Structures are given as structure tokens and as C-alpha cells.
Image: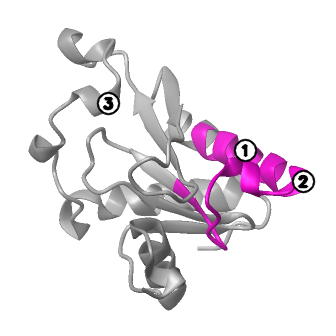
Amino acid sequence: MDVSMSTAIHRRVVALRAGTDPTRIARLPVGWVVLGDPQVLEGYCLLLPDPVVPHLNALAVAERTAFLAAMAAVGDVLQVECRAVRINYAMFGNVEPALHAHLFPRRADEPAERATAQPWAWDWGMAPAFSEAAHGALRDRLRRALLRTVPGALG
């Protein structure tokens, strides 16, 4: 298999470069910000490095620092734009062995049974799939906020 297509992360970055991924929020100097599909929480995003690397420790120290700083900057935007009380950050890479960060905006009004649960405990099959009609305005709002606040961000 072509290494450029070896994981879902690789395939998604290829689609982002080609301009064919409708979940694309913005291009940052370290990679891409996309809406998660499905939207298990409104505003759930991923940060995907470009170029794709196997894991965080595969990056040189300066690149690693830049990736983590970008992740926090995306979290800052999500906290404001999604009215979140906190952002849950996760990087595993066990299922898709390529670096990617999950960002989950957590709100004060979440149902009690979900408020203390980590997102992988939820039924993702019940979450709405990304659609332009349902999520396009959110994506565009997040894009505008990232372009205003993150140096080097491109729409």
C-alpha cells in the first residue's frame, strides 16, 4: 500500500491538500483543523499534522512544541466559539497509527450521564454525521475565529 494512504489520517490529509474534505476548518502552519465526523459533541475537532508523522515524539522538539501550541490555540477558539467550560484533548494513535489530536468542547449543560464520561464511552453511532446543512455554519465560524487569532492560519 502507498504509505501516503496507509491510515485514515494520511487519506484525510491527502483530501485536505486536494481541497475535497468538506470538514476543513483551516490550514495552520503545523497542519489542518477539521470538524470531527461524526459530531459526537458540537464543535468536536481534530488537528492533523502535515506532513503526517507516526506520533508526537517523531517530531523534532521545535515541531512538537509548535503542534502542541497550535492544539492549545484551537482549544482557545473552541472554548469561546462553542461556549465550553473546558476542552478535552486526546492523542492516542492506537487505531490509526498517525499523529492526530482530538479536541472536545465540554459544556456546562451536558446531560449528567455524559458530563463526567470520556467521549469514547458514548455511542458514536448515534452522533450526527457531518453535513453542510447542519455543521457548515459552525465550521465557517470556527474558521473565521482561527483566522483572526492564530498566526499563519489560512482559510
User: Can you name the residue that lies furthest to the front here?
Assistant: 1
Q: Which residue: 52% across, 82% down?
A: 3
Q: Residues within 10 Å of mark 1 (few under 14, many from 20)?
A: some
Bin the neighbour count of mark 2 within 10 Å (Cα to Cα): few under 14, some 14-19, many 20 and up: few
Do residues under tags 3 and 1 come within 8 Å of each other at their CB atoms?
no
Mark identifier at residue 37:
none
- Amino acid at pointer 2: Ala
Colour logic:
one colour
- What residue is pinned by disc 2? 62
Instruction: Tell me where residue 72 appears, x and y as whole percent.
Output: 67, 39
**Image position of 73 with respect to 54: above or below:** above
In the drawing, does residue 50 fall left or right of residue 59? Answer: left
Q: Which residues are magenta?
A: 47-75
Number of residues whose C-alpha sits closer than 10 Å to that of mark 3, classed few (under 14), some (14–19) or many (20 or more): some
Q: Main secondary structure of the magenta part?
A: helix
Q: Is residue 55 above or below residue 86?
A: below
Q: Earlier in the sequence, mark 2 or mark 3?
A: 2
